[in-house]
Image: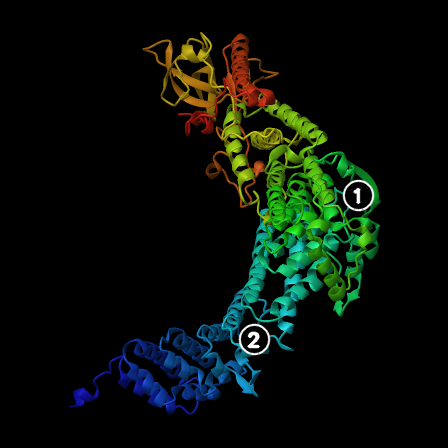
Amino acid sequence: MWFSFWRSRDRFSLDQLRYLADQLTKVQIVNEVNKDFVIEALRSIAELITYGDQHDPSFFEFFMEKQVVGEFVRVLKLSRTMSIPLQLLQTVSIMIQNLRSEHAIYYMFSNEHMNYLITYPFDFRNEELLSYYISFLRAISGKLNKNTISLLVKTRNDEIVSFPLYVEAIRFAFHEESMVRTAVRTVTLNVYHVGDECVNRYIASAPHTDYFSNLVSFFRNQCMDLNRLVSETLKNPGPDSTSAIIAAVDEIEDNLYYFSDVISAGIPDVGRLITDSILMLLIFPILLPSLRLLDVNDMQSGVVTSLYLLCCILRIVKIKDLANTIVVALFYPLEALTTFSRGKVNGYISDLGFTSVSQEPDNDNIAKCNAECLTVNVPNPSSSPSFHSESMSEDNCSNSNLALREVFLAYITKGNDLQVLGSLSVLATLLQTKELDESMLDRLGILPQRKQHKKQLLQALVGEDSGEEQLFSSENSLARDGSGCELDVYLEKIKEQYGLSFLSSDFITSPRVPRFQVLDALVSLFCRSNISAETLWDGGWLLRQLLPYSEAEFNTQHLELLKDSYKNSATALVKEVRGFWLDLLITVLCNEWRKCKRAMESSYPPKEPKCILFPSQMLSSEEDIPEGSSFAAGERMHESVKVFVVLHQLQIFTLGRHVPEQPLIYPPGDLPANSRAQTSGLDISGPKPGTEVSLVNAVPCRIAFERGKERHFCFLAISVGTSGWLVLAEELPMKKPYGVVRVAAPLAGCNPRIDDKHPRWLHLRIRPSSLPVLDPAKFNVHAQGKLKTKAFVDGRWTLAFRDEESCKTASSMILEEINLLSDEVHRRLKPLLNLETTLDLSGLSTCDSEDSSSHTTPPNSAKGF
């Protein structure tokens, strides 16, 4: 009998739940003595209710009958320690998250218990308590629907007058901790997507609408912080600053995606509120005025940041009014927006735009900047049915008179690499923004040719005008097709809502002018030598999007400029035939040809907008190459190849030809008779360690790979096709004149030099067998894909020969083999360097797998055995 009395209760039983609830009702005070029991009771009850919800309905029936939630609230009131509120919030959160029964959720949300807990004055100075509280709010929001949400609001005359869950959540919307902000956004989105009309009216009414303008203000501050980070990075680049920018970019894009999610909920007027706030607090007073033209050499972090943010906003926040308003604002003179940024318009107090690293936010600086104005000479349209812009003249004009769309073009023609990339990214983003009307793209000059033809064909079919005139005439009048109406609507809207007036006399009326301004700017870009290859690829992509039908809109001057630029790139490529990496030149060329063709034909630009914030390093001259660094020379070679490839493919494109999958080059030639490669017995696979070779042409030498450990070898320099090696072999005493390869290194870039003081010593530079671009896993490349060249130093060999004559013989052998290697590379590239030959496909071959793969020295072959 006594044994049965003391028998322990089953942990997951109704008796255990009854016992815990009974003990909880007996608690009259919570102090240090009994707090552990209360905490364990709360935890166990949550566990039992979750179990019962899935296995035994009687558990929750007892829970409701005894009104245990009310006991939770009573215990909270009695508590004087921090541990009880922590456990209580965790208990209720676990229960709500795990309850599957809709009936159980209804009970939990009824009787005002949840609202009491939501509005309870917790001490949020405790970070752990705040974390549990936000999780509690998120758990409740996860169970919201049109039925349950009504249990959490108070109404009067069928209108909601109180919604504690929403109001208390947005109090922490701008908390310094990102996890808290993220949880609050989850709560709000769960509320918005319920779709209850009364709740939506409550959210869209004052003062709750302040939340959305405060969101944009908070976002604006984040944009300011990003600009400061970019400014510091431009002054002091480094991995830490790069990581900080990446984190800031992620936060900014998360905010924009949140805006997009809020808008997608379809709450009336919220989309308009967010649009107006973004325009009035960020776009008009900060981003657009920050695009003022300054000295090209100035590190304009404000310009770069503004261009990136414009791309992000257009790409993520898909609101038609927002996108179209931004586009129409690009036709305004910069002075109008600069004036806006200094004043108070329609109740909004605006700030100055971003400032650059070397510039103070002085109003006078904004107005004093000068720039070059782009103008297009438009001939009489009746003179030729196929109009081409003959020239783009450059006249000095005040920056204040320059329209923002012309600022983009000025950056493309005169800006630095980041400004060019940013302007191209904005134009590419506009081109891909589906919310924009085609007439807007047409007035910007970036409506793709195929869409123009499609529109003209439709107009011809419905009889709006002569079909032949519409399809085959270059005069695509906006007045005829009525596409100017959309522009007029937004011009008037900007004037009425935002107080920005526009002088119609300054507006470009001919749709051909902006198109040929864009075309002229792109052609000018390809003629620039101070722009990175990656940026030129972006320009090539945009050109291909605008002109899929090749030469249709190029004039004679365009073709001549592109051809001259191509010849310059070919000259730079020929220099690499004598460079450090000539043995990998064809391999890199074949790889980049395929990449460029894919990039040009892709539906998306080659680079993401965030790349604007990370400057690329360009090494374009001998002075740029640090002494002793073949890595920097490899980057220069890679850059030269990419520039040549994009300009070559554009040449083929402008001539109306199809770009082949591989560059057309001559096939590998036969080895010369009695060459060192033949006499040594080596083939194209190269001298692997342990390979037996003939030492007929070898020169005996000594070298020490370790201090005090000198070794004797026979030295050979060998070239096979477009590959070459420096070989150190050990002679086989029983099989002369043969030996075994012990060490091999690349021939190219070895730069042989006889020592001035010791004429029997030969110094050789030993570069790696592969480039980072061909084998990135082998090298330490950081997040943005740029090699830290200063961290690498080339190897050095010093070979000691028995006499001066032997040393000179070895040096001459190296130079002869390098010349053979260089001549073979140049011979194979000849058709690619001559455009007319390239177009004649006879006698040429594409890159084979041998060329497309890296000809590298076997692993560890450059180490002594």
For label 2, the SS is: helix
Mark number for residue 472?
none
Q: How many marks?
A: 2
> Measured along the vertical axis of the image, is residue 715 above or below residue 600?
above
User: Residue 117: x, y in percent?
Assistant: 49, 82
56 to the left or right of 113: left
Disc number placed over residue 373 in the picture, else none: 1
Q: Which mark is residue 200?
A: 2
Q: Position of residue 120 (x, y in %)?
A: 52, 83
Query: The N terminus lies in which quarter of the figure?
Result: bottom left
Position of residue 472 relative to residue 204, above or below, is: above
Q: Based on the displayed image, in which of its 4 quarters is residue 819 positioned?
A: top right
| Residues at marks 1 and 2, CA–CA distance in whole angstroms | 49 Å
* Amino acid residing under circle 1: Cys
| Left or right: 538, with 283 as reference point | left
Q: Position of residue 521 (x, y in %)?
A: 71, 39
Chain-order first, disc 1 or disc 2: 2
Could you classify mark 1 by the number of other residues whose Cα lies within 10 Å: few (under 14), some (14-19), or many (20 or more)? many
Kindly identify the amino acid type of the residue bearing the numbered disc 2.
Asn
Colour scheme in use: rainbow
Under circle 1, the secondary element is strand
- Residue closest to the eye, 192 or 480: 480
Q: Could you say which is closer to the camera, residue 584 or residue 830?
A: 830
Asked if disc 1 and disc 2 are in contact, CB closer than 8 Å, the reply is no
User: Which residue is pictured at 54% across the width and 39% down the height?
Assistant: 601
Vertical comparison of 90 with 644: above or below: below
- The answer to whether residue 237 shows anywhere in this view is no
176 to the left or right of 105: right
Q: Specify few, some or many for label 2: CA neighbours under 10 Å numbering under 14, 14-19, or 20 or more.
A: many
Depth check: give the residue in front, 385 or 252: 385
